[in-house]
Image (cartoon, helix red, strand yellow):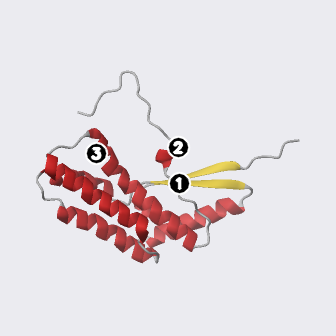
Amino acid sequence: MAPRRQSWIVLKFGGTSVSSLANWCNIADVINARLQGGPARVLVVHSAVSGITDRLEKLLDAALTGTHEPLLAAIEQRHRQLAAELGIDVGPELAQYFSLLRQISSGIALTNEISDRTRARALATGELMATQLGAQFLNARGIHASWWDARSGLKAAPRANAHARA
């Protein structure tokens, strides 16, 4: 008889749920409870830190007028603040995302245009930064967490009758 495969438990958390130490402690408790409930693998999916997607949208608009630096600083500071609250380092991964946002903003300011691809790349950094922090926090709490970039396994496909962004 073939060995029984572990089932997956998928936990999805929104932006508010990943925005404070108290909420991350709750997430860790939920994961531990699921792991103790029997053989299963837990997949945690979550949003960007509360308010970051809106700030990223504003960042792109501000880059068109060259006024993006204060928004870049605020986005970076929010992630540094959360990392400190969680008791973890920002790490080189987050520093790379801060640099990427700076490059994207500078490019928009230089060309005075934002493509859909550039917008998607900038907005995705919110989830990428938050999930990096989350994985670090869970590992620091003794929960083995492997960070996985969903872009490496999930691909968007064109849909019939889909409308372009207005």
Label 1, label 2: how far apart the Cα atoms are:
9 Å
Residue on which disc 2 sits: 153
Q: CB of mark 1 within 8 Å of CB of mark 2?
A: yes
Residue 57 placement (x, y as % from top left)? 25, 51
Q: Residue at x 25, y 60 (%)?
A: 102
Q: Residue at x 66, y 54 (%)?
A: 41
Which element carries disc 2, helix, strand or loop? loop
Residue 147 placement (x, y as % from top left)? 53, 58
Extreme residue in the top direction: 161
Residue 111's place in the image compared with 44, above or below, is above
Residue on which disc 3 sits: 119
> First in sequence: mark 2 or mark 3?
3
Residue 131 placement (x, y as % from top left)? 46, 59
> First in sequence: mark 1 or mark 2?
1
Judging depth in this view, the residue of 117 and 45 nearest the camera is 117
Crowding at dot 3, Cα within 10 Å, few <14 / some 14-19 / many 20+, comes out as some
Residue on which disc 1 sits: 148
Task: Work out whether residue 9 can be spotted.
Answer: yes
Judging depth in this view, the residue of 2 and 32 nearest the camera is 2
Extreme residue in the left direction: 65
